[in-house]
Amino acid sequence: MNNNETIEDKEILYRRVKVHKPNIHFNDRRYERHKSGKIEVLPLAFYDGNREISVDRASKHNFDPSKTQRDKTDGIAKLITAKVRDIDIEDYKIDVKYDPDDMNDAHSIIVMIPDVDNQIPAENIDYPTQDLREDLARIANQLGWVIEPAF
């Protein structure tokens, strides 16, 4: 596996969105079903609890989003690498890095890279930020679900 492989701007990314119980507290929801039936991706869908956000390269899964699911109830949101890289957050560049592992050759991560002029010490950087998660949710909602979460 070549971790140095470049991810092209046109590449499709899949983000697994775990299904949640209908009675889950609103602040813990990863998506919301509206009365119209539309399912909206919420920013929490992009929270991984660490300094990177996991996604899969669709091309490495032969564009089969079910390979990104861990459970058949999981939803799969779609992102485009260029749209992710175009996110504008002050003092940071947003990038997608290929990060395959033994279990998933498609695994990649969305990272926030401090600008060269950014004087914030690395240990004080609190990322990924809520702003990044909100922007990723906005992009996912524009592009639509590849697989909607099952209820």
Image (spheres, rainbow, N blue to C red):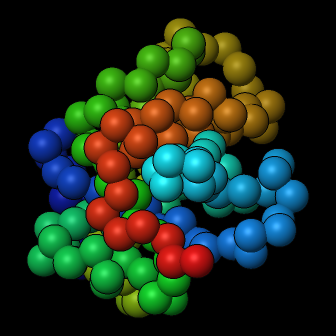
Residue at 42%, 67% (x, y): give it. Answer: 148
Q: Tell whether 34 sits left or right of 113.
A: right
Q: As drawn, is 7 to the left or to the right of 129? A: left
Q: Residue furthest right?
A: 25
Residue 114 visible in the picture: yes
Q: Is residue 130 above or below residue 80?
A: above
Q: Picture quarter containing residue 119?
A: top right
Foreground of the two, 25 or 78: 25
At 37% across and 77% down in the image, what residue appears? 68
From what the image shows, is residue 92 above or below residue 140? above
Q: Is residue 51 left or right of residue 57?
A: right
- Lateral position of residue 74 relative to residue 9, left or right: right
Residue 74: x percent and y percent?
50, 77
On the image, the x and y values in percent for residue 94 come to 43, 32
Where does the N terminus fall, quadrant-wise? Answer: bottom left
Q: Which image quadrant is residue 128 in?
A: top right
Residue at 79% over, 31% down = 124
Q: Quadrant of the C terminus?
A: bottom right
Residue 6, visible in the rendered structure: no
Task: From the viewer's side, name the closer residue of 57 and 41.
Answer: 41
Q: 29 or 32: nearer the eye?
A: 32
Q: Position of residue 146 (x, y in %)?
A: 30, 63
Residue 134 place in picture, x, y as percent: 58, 34
Residue 76's place in the image compared with 36, above or below, is: below
Q: How many marks?
A: 0
Task: Single out the residue that lies furthest toward the front.
Answer: 36
Q: Residue at x 74, y 70 (%)?
A: 22
Q: Nearer the viewer, residue 134 or 110?
A: 134
